[in-house]
Image: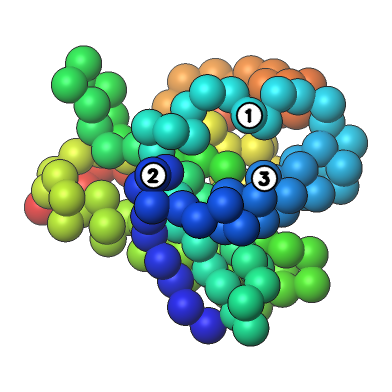
Amino acid sequence: MEILIKKFSELSRKELYDVLALRSEVFVVEQACAYLDVDGKDAHAHHLLCIENKVLIAYLRLFLEDSNGDNANIGRVVVRSTHRKKGLAIKIMKKAMAFIKTQQKGTPIELSAQRYLVKFYGDLGFSVEGDGYLEDGIPHIKMVYQPTS
């Protein structure tokens, strides 16, 4: 298994296709949520790909803090159904958090967590901020990680 972090321009066509297919498989089909996954933000993101035997098994996208002062952000965290309950989500989240720390030490990290994942992200050091909201018909809540150093 290998974990790669690439800018959008570094993704091969196959990698991009695999990313969009996995996100669609889980977020649109499995979660029965019709939403616009191709949101125009991928070109500005870094993409973390977890590949095993040439198959994309887990993925997330991340944004570094931008010039407007917006915090770093992690989203589209997804693990293929056949590879869940093996600690992959924790592994890719920790890798993304470490990447952000090496690129922009001290930068807070935000995410929009599906409500049922509050404990998962909380165990990684994220804290709930504000009230919950519906995003694409699914209950979410903003969570923020404040690095200590």
The Cα–Cα distance between marks 1 and 3, rounded to whole angstroms, is 8 Å
* Residue 139 as seen in the image, left or right of residue 127: right
Where's residue 120, x and y in %?
56, 55
Q: Which residue, given by chain and number where applicable, does mark 2 sit on?
A: 9
- The amino acid on which the numbered mark 3 sits, given as a three-letter code, is Leu
The Cα–Cα distance between marks 2 and 1, rounded to whole angstroms, is 16 Å
Where's residue 73, x and y in %?
38, 36
Residue visible at 27% across and 22% down in the picture:
70
Question: Which numbered tag is attached to residue 48?
Answer: none
- The amino acid on which the numbered mark 1 sits, given as a three-letter code, is Val
Q: Nearer the viewer, residue 86 or 123?
A: 86
Q: Pointers 1 and 3 in contact (CB under 8 A)?
A: yes
* Residue 75 as seen in the image, left or right of residue 29: left
Q: Which residue, given by chain and number where applicable, does mark 3 sit on?
A: 20
Check the image and name the residue furthest to the front: 13
- Report the colour scheme: rainbow
* Residue 101 as seen in the image, left or right of residue 113: left
Residue visible at 57% across and 52% down in the picture:
13
- Is residue 14 shown above or below 33? below
- Is residue 85 shown above or below 144? below
Question: Which numbered tag is attached to residue 38?
Answer: 1
Q: Mark 2 falls on what kind of element? A: helix
Q: Badge 2: few (under 14), some or many (20 or more) residues near its Cα, within 10 Å?
A: few
Q: Nearer the viewer, mark 2 or mark 1?
A: 2
Residue visible at 25% across and 50% down in the picture:
100
